Image (cartoon, rainbow, N blue to C red):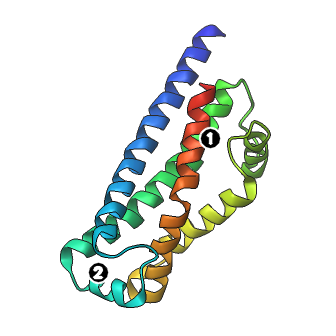
Amino acid sequence: MGNKTVIYKQKVYDNLAESYKHLKRLNGALNELQKKHPFPISSDGFNEIANNIQTLAYSDQAIYRFSKLQDCIGAKLFKSVLLYQGENINKPFLDILNQLEKIEIVNVDEWFEIRDLRNEIAHDYDNNETLALNILNTIFEIKDDLEQILISIKKIT
């Protein structure tokens, strides 16, 4: 039993490290964008971003890193935390979220909003600049929620 605990704890650490890597790169890209276009970015500001290869790259990186961060937390980190806590993870994802909410890791409703944003990104936002602008501004608004999830997990491990 003790050996499994060590393995599960290491898995939590590995998933936290991956999550923090994505968060760091997300924050870096958002900071670079904010130097020229304060958030929330206006429609005119987004047009300038879209017409400049460097700022467009930062925009794409922010969107990509948000997606990777959300995926890592939802698909890997949450389950590894529950395994480390000695919980069964062979259950519907909503039950996993409810368990995490009980130990004050995540708010279920907020997580579904984050997941919905991630799902919007999975569709082709490149052809809809208004959608891309809204996604970028929303990512800026909720990135701190993702960081708080990581902080909460770090506290219990």
Coordinates of residue 64 in the picture (x, y in percent): 39, 63
Q: Is residue 2 above or below residue 125?
A: above
Residue drawn at x 36%, y 90% is 44
Q: Earlier in the sequence, mark 1 or mark 2?
A: 2
Coordinates of residue 117 in the picture (x, y in percent): 57, 69
Q: Which element carries disc 2, helix, strand or loop? A: helix
Q: Is residue 84 above or below residue 95?
A: above
Coordinates of residue 92 in the picture (x, y in percent): 76, 48
The amino acid sitting under disc 1 is Phe
Q: Residue 77, can we see it?
A: yes
The amino acid sitting under disc 2 is Ile
Q: Quadrant of residue 7?
A: top right
User: Callout 1 environment at 10 Å: few (<14), some (14 to 19), or many (20+)?
Assistant: many
Q: Quadrant of the N terminus?
A: top right
* Numbered mark located on residue 49 in the image: 2
Q: Which residue is mark 1?
A: 78
Nearer to us in this view, 139 or 87: 139
Residue drawn at x 40%, y 49% is 22
Q: Is residue 152 left or right of residue 135?
A: right
Report the residue that reaches farthest toward the left: 53
* Numbered mark located on residue 44 in the image: none
Coordinates of residue 124 in the picture (x, y in percent): 44, 80
Give the CA distance from mark 1 to mark 2.
Answer: 34 Å
Nearer to us in this view, 141 or 120: 141
Q: Is residue 60 left or right of residue 123?
A: left
How many numbered marks are there?
2
Q: Is residue 148 above or below residue 39?
A: above
Q: Is residue 36 left or right of residue 10?
A: left
Front tag of 1 and 2: 2
